[in-house]
Image (cartoon, rainbow, N blue to C red):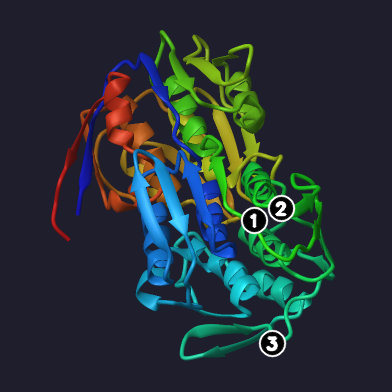
Amino acid sequence: MDKLLVHGGSTLSGSINISGSKNASLPILAAALLTDQEVIIERVPDVSDTNYMLQILSALGCEVERYSGTVKIKAAQIHPEAPYDLVRKMRASICVMGPLVARLGRASVSIPGGCVIGDRPIDLHLKGLQAIGAEIDTEGGNILIRAKHGLTGSHVDLRGKHGPTVLGTDNLMMAAVLAKGTTIIESAACEPEVVDLANFLNSMGAKIEGAGSRRITIEGVDELSGTHHTVIPDRIEAGTFMVAGALASPGGITLNRVRQDHLTEATQKLLEAGHDVKFSNDGLSVFVQAGNDPKGCEITTAPHPGFPTDMQAQFTAMFAITPGISVVEDTIFPQRFMHCAELTRMGAHIKVDNGTAKVQGVAQLSAAPVMASDLRASAALVLAGLRARGTTEINRLYHIDRGYEMIDEKLLQLGANVQRVRGSI
């Protein structure tokens, strides 16, 4: 397995381009199943999650071509069985359910495996599909979905225990675009990635209104056509590098290909913590500089437009060396604090209790061998390593490769001293 060596003490400077959104790309790639015509999707990040999705599409019968961040997909002849050996590698593969049942009237998708950051059930996905006429059964570890008489629009409330479901909203929206009549999704997720999927579907001929709000209306159409689409920037990657600038760049770094309106909460908390954040007039570039007098603050995660759960680990790493006390509460995934034990190995003072981390900033972290437990936790360890004394060895690097495109190369471009050590599985 690969590992990353982060040599602490480097000062970051310069600029990088932010990649296309991993979380937007996955359902958009799955949505290519909805038409037999060719779709072209640009700025698809080269990360393991998108690679797995493309393998799943190929296994379903799609013709897939990929080059320089652009993907061409033609789903002329497809079948409804998504194989376990691929689905088990990525939970987001569940979003092929909606397109398959809409296009073919049936789908067989292996139940995804567990998730290290807590229980992430798919009951809301199934509830949404059942509400528009799908019959659902399980057999041999597979979810069997049938719509013998087609799908019919309905009024569906997707409210869940911990807030709206992003992939559940995506799945229902993709299924409903080819349903008869009108589907109204209440308590819909309103993340930018949901809006990007809706824009992609509308460019194919779908009739979707209200994406980005808690109420989405979909008027079913008979068929969809091919299209050409560019994926939105990855707001979590952008936020991660914004934190890197606040941690290790007294002179500032510039991030290009961002969306200011997608980074409101991260920006607000960096400013509150005493760092400098300045966007270009068009909001597509941002300059981040470490403040002279940083201070702790409080964060509570919430569904969009609240503070994203996918950014709390990175901010926890920043707070670990920020003077004063900071409090981080995750209301979406209360168990998502395994990075705190690894940060403690590096000298951080963090106490976790019932979904809340209390962080007492220290003057210096010390390098140590650490273990990545999930995608965002691994990013937090990289950030901590930038400011630690010595060389931090981050193992299980495959976690970070799920969602960060060439993170080591981008850090090198900014002047960090990092080294990927190749290993065998």
Kindly identify which residue carries mark 2. Answer: 189
Q: Position of residue 134 (x, y in %)?
A: 70, 81
Q: Quadrant of the C terminus?
A: bottom left
Mark 1 is surrounded, within 10 Å at the Cα level, by few (under 14), some (14 to 19) or many (20 or more) other residues, namely some
Task: Name the one closer to the observer, 359 or 403.
Answer: 403
Q: Position of residue 24 (x, y in %)?
A: 55, 47
Q: Is residue 413 visible?
A: yes
Q: Which mark is residue 143?
A: none
Task: Name the one closer to the observer, 182 or 395.
Answer: 182
Tell which circle, 2 or 1, labels the residue nearer the N-terminal end: 1
Q: Disc 2 vs disc 1: Cβ atoms closer than 8 Å? A: yes
Task: Name the one closer to the observer, 155 or 401.
Answer: 155
Q: Residue at x 55, y 43 (%)?
A: 228
Q: What amino acid is labelled 2 in the image?
A: Ala
Kindly identify which residue carries mark 1. Answer: 166
Q: Position of residue 247 (x, y in %)?
A: 42, 22
Q: Nearer the viewer, mark 3 or mark 1?
A: 3
Tell which circle, 3 or 1, labels the residue nearer the N-terminal end: 3
Quadrant hosting residue 277: top right
- Secondary element under disc 3, as helix, strand or loop, is loop
- Secondary element under disc 1, as helix, strand or loop, is helix
**In the picture provided, is 187 more to the left or to the right than 66?**
right
Q: Is residue 361 visible?
A: no
Quadrant hosting residue 54: bottom left
Kindly identify which residue carries mark 3. Answer: 148
**In the picture provided, is 42 more to the left or to the right than 412?**
right
Mark 2 is surrounded, within 10 Å at the Cα level, by few (under 14), some (14 to 19) or many (20 or more) other residues, namely many
Q: Quadrant of the N terminus?
A: bottom left
